[in-house]
Image: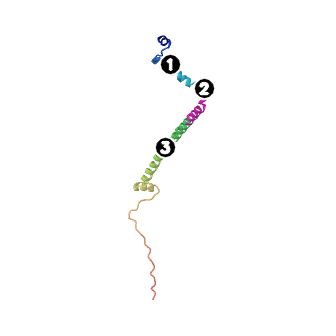
Amino acid sequence: MIKEAKNIPVQEAPTPAQRVRSDWKALLEKFSYTAIVSNVPYLAFVALLCVLYISSNKRAVETQRALNKLNDTLKELRWEYMDAKSQMMRAQMETEVIKNSDKLGLKPMLMPAFNIEKQQPAQPQAN
């Protein structure tokens, strides 16, 4: 019985280096030709998702650029509006009106304005 035990090979625990090699071999087997062919639908789906992601990202960037350009235009128009509004407020001031009307030969009134009232003709009384 002892002789039989000597002929049986004893399997030792693999060393860490052997474990790493066997892990790499298993990983390479997963990427074999048959594994790739059997996963073609999945790979095509992943490729389609990548294309959709890239195109949507590009569209989002273009939209953001357009929004930035419109915001810049809006700021510029707002400044033009504020400038025109301040010029109009300045032109409505009494001193500016007097200056501008002086060029036309008009002068401000020295007397205050008064109302002209129209008198109603006397109504004949009915007896």
Q: Which mark is residue 4?
A: none
Residue beneath label 2, please? 34
**Membership of 30 in magenta stretch:** no
Residue 70, percent from left and from top = 51, 43
Q: Residues within 10 Å of mark 3 (few under 14, many from 20)?
A: few
Disc with the residue nearer the chain's start (1 vs 2) = 1
**Magenta region: which residues?**
33-52
Residue 52, percent from left and from top = 56, 37
Most prominent secondary structure in the magenta stretch? helix
Q: Nearer the viewer, residue 13 or 103?
A: 13
Name the kind of residue labelled 3 in the image. Asn
Which residue reaches farthest bottom?
127
Q: Residues within 10 Å of mark 2 (few under 14, many from 20)?
A: few
Q: Nearer the viewer, residue 48 or 60?
A: 48
Q: Which mark is residue 21?
A: 1
Q: Residue at x 56, y 35 (%)?
A: 49
Disc with the residue nearer the chain's start (2 vs 3) = 2
Name the kind of residue labelled 2 in the image. Thr
Left or right for 41, reference 20: right
Mark whose residue sits in front, 2 or 3:
2
Q: Which mark is residue 71?
A: 3
Name the kind of residue labelled 1 in the image. Arg
